[in-house]
Amino acid sequence: MAQEKVRKADAKVAIGNTAVLDAAHLGDIRGAFGTIAEHESNTPRTWRRRLLALAVIMGPGLIVMVGDNDAGGVATYAQAGQNYGTSLLWTLAFLIPVLIVNQEMVVRLGAVTGVGHGRLIFERFGRFWGWFAVGDLFILNFLTIATEFIGISLGAAYFGVTPYLAVPLAGILLIGITVTGRFETWERLMFVILFGNLLIIPLVILSHPNVGQVVHDLVIPGMKEGSTSGLTSNGVLLIIAIVGTTVAPWQLFFQQSNVVDKRITPRWIPYERADTVIGAFVVVLGATAIMVTTAFAFRSTPLAGQFVSAGTVATGIAHSLGSALGDLFAILLIDASIIGASAVTLATSYAFGDTFGIRHSLHRSWREAKPFYATFTALVVLAAGLTLFPNAPLGLITTAVQALAGVLLPSASLFLLLLCNDREVLGPWVNRTWLNIVATLILGILVMLSLILVVTTVFSSVNVPLLLGVLSIIMLVALVGVTVFTTRGARARSPETFSHEDRETWRMPSLALLTRPVPSRSRLVALYAMRGYLVLAVLLLLVKAVQLGTGH
């Protein structure tokens, strides 16, 4: 019913023959560092003017990436460093192209369509698949927001501040940052908090890392836990948690809606791509620094391999490197938690607005968009309350939520890939053949990782390296098939020719005017197979979490 109301409204009040409904999503681009007029041309430009334009547009990509170095990220990278040393650094290097490819696709979707990710899924796939995608997101995001408040409570506890004081104060701060009614004010405040991530620089330098070993482990895949080497079931769980915390499904929804809310149009896509690439390298450098810091802080100490939570990591660093560095880690944890809570809660509020057809823009005041801001406030209050339950296994909860994000990521990536090949949605901006091949390879690797977790949970004695080899061969054969199919499909279509100017001004028409695609048999098989697999994977992930929680 809600989507039908949105469709009717779209047909009546679409602005400028586009799908944009809310006038707040049209107008000048207002960023933390200035304004770009709505109809300003992006060429020709001197390098100085290009850098100034990039500074104005910079935001959605950097915030979404750094927001992923949140409480769950800090805890997961710290666990990898404390338990596995630097042997898992290669996973972070692998995630750079994953981040760039996935987030570049949502940049195009946001700038070209003018609507959020959730709404596109509802309109192009129908209510059943819309609720499948958005319903999973709501559950996962709520749990993720809870982990952000877990990070705040652990960081505050390190300084002797009770969570019953720290968590409510953090919630009030989050709400205050968001309800300003001015997009540029919110972005400036977010940039101020982002600078807190620079605390990782003195931490990593003063941990005295072995640079040669760091470089080796960044480029050579491997895994070493204590005195044993090779892939294990617990190691695979942690790898999936690293993937899930670095490339989370909420990022897709956040950046697309934030691009729309910032009023970025197709002519500015190259600048937003640059913002995204910069953010991808920043987040991976930060994650690497955390993993390296904990690896060398705990190496050859009794605490090596004894991760409990991010709070105990701060205490351990204080013992091994000095109280000042322990303080810095705890402050970094709190800062990262606030960034993550703001970004994930806002992503959920954006998706709620998309789903139920309500105003959802940071350009609007509380009075103009009460349901949007009320959703944000309710999420903060409920997630904060959940973290205050006594005796909860906070470290295990955090790792399990990140792993859940990794398990659900292939589903979100599949919808994204299908949308980016929808010509009625993206017109001249649809994926090129090479990008489809790369995106399919990434999707296959993500599915393979979660499948290894499923198999090792059911059959604990399975030979993980052998399983990895078999699945890799199957994936490569499937990739060859997809490549052949995609190439033939591209040749069969008569491509439309668009000039550079036409591409810069092309926007998706009103959604009510588009013909909903008839799902092919192969698409339905892929979607239903993914759905069935995810149900199984999530159930077995819960089994794995219970096993770890009970010490089995």
Image (tube, rainbow, N blue to C red):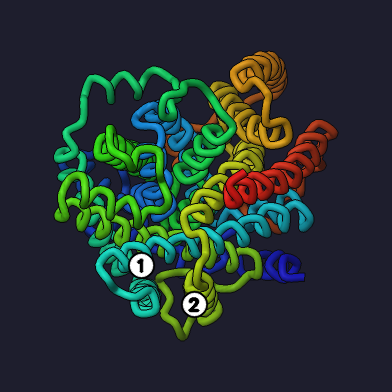
In the rendered image, the vertical position of residue 228 relative to residue 50, given as above or below: above
Tell whether 208 sits left or right of 543: left
Contact, CB < 8 Å: mark 1 with mark 2? no
Q: Is residue 371 left or right of residue 517?
A: left
Depth check, mark 1 against mark 2: the one in front is 2
Three-letter code for the amino acid on which mark 1 is drawn = Phe
Vertical arrangement, residue 265 with respect to residue 357, above or below? above
Q: x and y percent of residue 72 in the render?
A: 44, 52
Q: Which mark is residue 183?
A: 1
Q: Nearer the viewer, residue 152 or 522?
A: 152
**Secondary element at tag 1:** helix
The residue under label 2 is which amino acid type? Val
**Residue 186 visible in rendering:** yes
Could you classify mark 2 by the number of other residues whose Cα lies within 10 Å: few (under 14), some (14-19), or many (20 or more)?
Answer: some
Instruction: Provide the secondary structure element on which disc 2 rests.
Output: helix
Relative image position of residue 349 (x, y in whole percent): 53, 67
**Residue at 28 percent of width and 25 percent of height:** 214
Percent position of residue 497, x then y: 56, 28
Q: Which mark is residue 381?
A: 2
What residue lies at 28% left-to-right and 38% top-to-bottom? 301
Q: Quick one: label 1, few (<14), some, or many (20+) residues within 10 Å?
A: many
- Which residue is drawn at the image coordinates 44% and 57% (left, top)? 258
* Residue at left offset 23%, top offset 56%: 196
Q: Quadrant of the C terminus?
A: top right
